[in-house]
Image: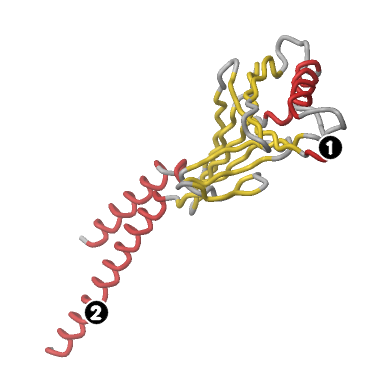
Amino acid sequence: MMKKIGAVLCLFFVAVALSACNAFHADTTKNYPQENPQETTVFLRVNTDAIPDGSTIADELTKWKANVLMQQSTEATATKIIDIKYDTETPSVYRADLTIQNVPDSVLTKTVRPFKITYHQSIYNPIALLPETDIFQYNVLYSSERRHSESSATESDYIDGEYAYYWTDATTVEFTDVYPNRPLYIVLVFAGALVIGVAVYLISRYYDCKKRKHQL
């Protein structure tokens, strides 16, 4: 009887392992198209020491906008800035709202391994379309309710209940999140329970047999 039960349990766990193999080892990549055109924001921090004599920040912003638009590609399918609107109310940091055409897809890679699941997401960084300048330092900001396991950010802060990540160069915006692979832990719990059950059964049988021999 016990041999039959053991065989059934063995077949059960083999079936579970085979049906869940993708839950233990799999790699998938998905591309998520972005809005076209896409609205995004870059913050401009002013280096006042670099402003030429006789010029103002407003003058430099006007020249910067014209320079950015002039340097964009003329190809229809190229990623490019087609419009810029900026806010001049802040004395040291200015908000520039960019309208970008043909933004590359956001790429999400899921890597499943026995003990962990890793999500890696890459997002296009609009700083890649902006020219170098001594007057303005570029800042791209992304916020998240949870702290990411890793990121390509320059730095991160905890502000108003959210984690803020900053990019100051054209580095691709990347986030990595690591989670435990729960299906494996569930299988391990069942396997552990089976091992404990078998051990208890064998020990009880051992003492029963020993007791019978002693009675004889």
Q: Residues within 10 Å of mark 2 (few under 14, many from 20)?
A: few
Depth check, mark 1 against mark 2: the one in front is 1
Q: CA distance from mark 1 to mark 2?
A: 87 Å
Q: Residues within 10 Å of mark 1 (few under 14, many from 20)?
A: few
Residue at position x 83%, y 34% in the image = 51
Mark number for residue 206? 2
Residue 165 placement (x, y as % from top left):
59, 44
Tell me where residue 205 sits by quadrant: bottom left
Residue 43 placement (x, y as % from top left):
65, 33
Which amino acid does the dot numbered 1 rest on? Answer: Ala
On the rendered structure, is 18 left or right of 69?
left
Between 78 and 155, the residue placed more toward the observer is 155
Q: Mark 1 near mark 2, Cβ–Cβ under 8 Å?
A: no
Q: Secondary structure at mark 2?
A: helix
Residue 32 placement (x, y as % from top left):
55, 25
Residue at position x 28%, y 52% in the image = 8
User: Which is nearer the N-term, disc 1 or disc 2?
Assistant: 1
The residue identified by callout 1 is 50
Residue 138 placement (x, y as % from top left):
71, 35
Residue at position x 57%, y 50% in the image = 157
